[in-house]
Image (cartoon, rainbow, N blue to C red):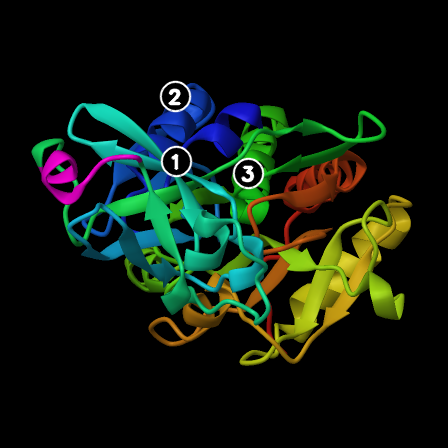
Amino acid sequence: MKDLIHAHGVSGSEEDVRAVIKEAIKGHVSEIDTDKMGNLIAIRKGPKPKIMLAAHMDEIGLVVKSISESGRMHFSPVGGIDPLTLIGQRVHIKAGKDVLHGVISTEELTDGNDITDKPKISDMFVDTGLDKKELEKKGVWVGTFMDLEQDSGPLGKDSIIYGKALDDRIGCYILLEVARRLKAKACEIAFVFTVQEEIGLYGAVTSAYELNPDWAIVVDVINTYESKDVRRIGKGPCLTIKDSLMITNKCLNNWIAEVARKKNIPIQLDVTDVGTTDALNISVSKGGVPSTVLGVCIKNIHSTAGIADLKDVEACIELLVELLRNPLKSCVV
C-alpha cells in the first residue's frame, strides 16, 4: 500500500505506478500485458465466465501552463481539485533524470499578506526557487506534469491512514491482494489497472473493448458524506447503486449484497448525484458489460491528504475473494 501511495502517477504519466503493480502481481497471474493506452492487464486463466476487475492507477495533479521570467509556474489541474486544498502544498517535478520540488503559493502568501478572497487556480503558482532559464535548463517546460507530494502513515490509531492518491491506489492494492489470496480458479479473471480515469475514464474504454468480459466490478474509492451521516469510514465496503451518470447492474448488486450478508461482511450502499467511475465506460463497451462499483469510502477525496480505514480495505478484499470463489455465470437484469 505504501509503495503504491508514494509512487507518482498523474493521469497520462502512470508508468511508475504500473512498475510497482507489475512487480507485485507477477507470480499470481498467467500473463501480463500493457496495452497501447498504458493499461496494465494481468490475466489469470480459468473457465468461463471471464470477469474484469478494474482499478485506476492515475491520480490528480497539475501541469505547467506558463512560466514567468522569475520562474513562477502557473498550472492547469489534471482531474478535479478544490483550489483551497492546494495552498502551501508541495509538488514533485520530474526534470529529466532529476527531481525538483516546489511549493504552491499566491501573491499574498508570498508577500506575507492576508488572503482575503478565496483563491482561484489562476491565482496560484509553483515556486521552485529557480528562474525561467534555470528551469528550462533542467528540462521543465510548459506541459511538464507535477505530482502533489504528501507523506503517508497512520493517524490516531493504526487502522486509520492518510496519504495522497488513495483514489485509487487503495483499489489497486485491493486487486493485488485478491490476486494473491484467491487460490481456486473458478473463473477467468482479468485484473485491469487503468490509465486516465481522472480526466475521462479513457483507459477503461480500450481495455474493456479488447477483453469483452462477461461482467465487471470496478474497485474505486467513494466520498463519505459523514456530515449527513450517510456513509462513514470504518463501516464496511461501499456498493454503488447510482452515481451522476450510471445506474449499476441490479443483478450484480443483489448478488454482492447477498454474499456479504451470508458472510457477515457489513456493506454501505452508495447513491450519489456527483462523479462517476470506470464502470460507466466498461458498461457500454461493445454490446454492453454488466458492471458495478465496489470499494471503500474515504475522507478528503481529491485532495493531497485522503483518510481511509484499513478495516474497510480488508473487508472489501474478503468480500471480493468470496465472490470469486463461486462467481455468477451471467448477469441478466
Measuring from the top left, give residue 225's x and y in whole percent: 78, 65
Measuring from the top left, give residue 98's x and y in whole percent: 22, 24
Q: Nearer the viewer, residue 34 or 133?
A: 133
Residue tagged 2: 23
Within the magenta stretch, is there residue 33? no
Quadrant location of the C terminus in the rendered image? bottom right
**Compared to 278, does 160 lie above or below?**
above
User: What numbered label is drawn on residue 175?
Assistant: 3
**Marks 1/3: CA distance?**
19 Å
Is residue 11 something that shows in the picture?
A: no
- Residue at 33 percent across and 27 percent down: it is 19
Query: In the rendered structure, which disc, 3 or 2, sits on the residue that comes first in sequence?
Result: 2
Pair 1/3: label in front: 1
- Residue at 62 percent across and 55 percent down: it is 301
> For the residue carrying disc 1, how many other residues have a C-alpha within 10 Å: few (<14), some (14-19), or many (20+)?
many
Relative placement, left or right, of 75 versus 252 is left
Query: In the rendered structure, which disc, 1 or 3, sits on the residue that comes first in sequence?
Result: 1
**Compared to 232, does 315 lie above or below?**
above
Query: In the rendered structure, which disc, 2 or 1, sits on the residue that comes first in sequence?
Result: 1
Query: Given contact means CB atoms under 8 Å apart, are the residues at marks 1 and 3 in contact?
Result: no
**Marks 3/2: CA distance?**
14 Å
Relative placement, left or right, of 234 versus 80 is right
Q: Which residues are magenta?
A: 129-136
Within the magenta stretch, is there residue 135? yes
Amino acid type, residue under disc 2 in the picture: Glu
- Residue at 34 percent across and 43 percent down: it is 127
Residue tagged 1: 8
Principal SS element in the magenta part? helix
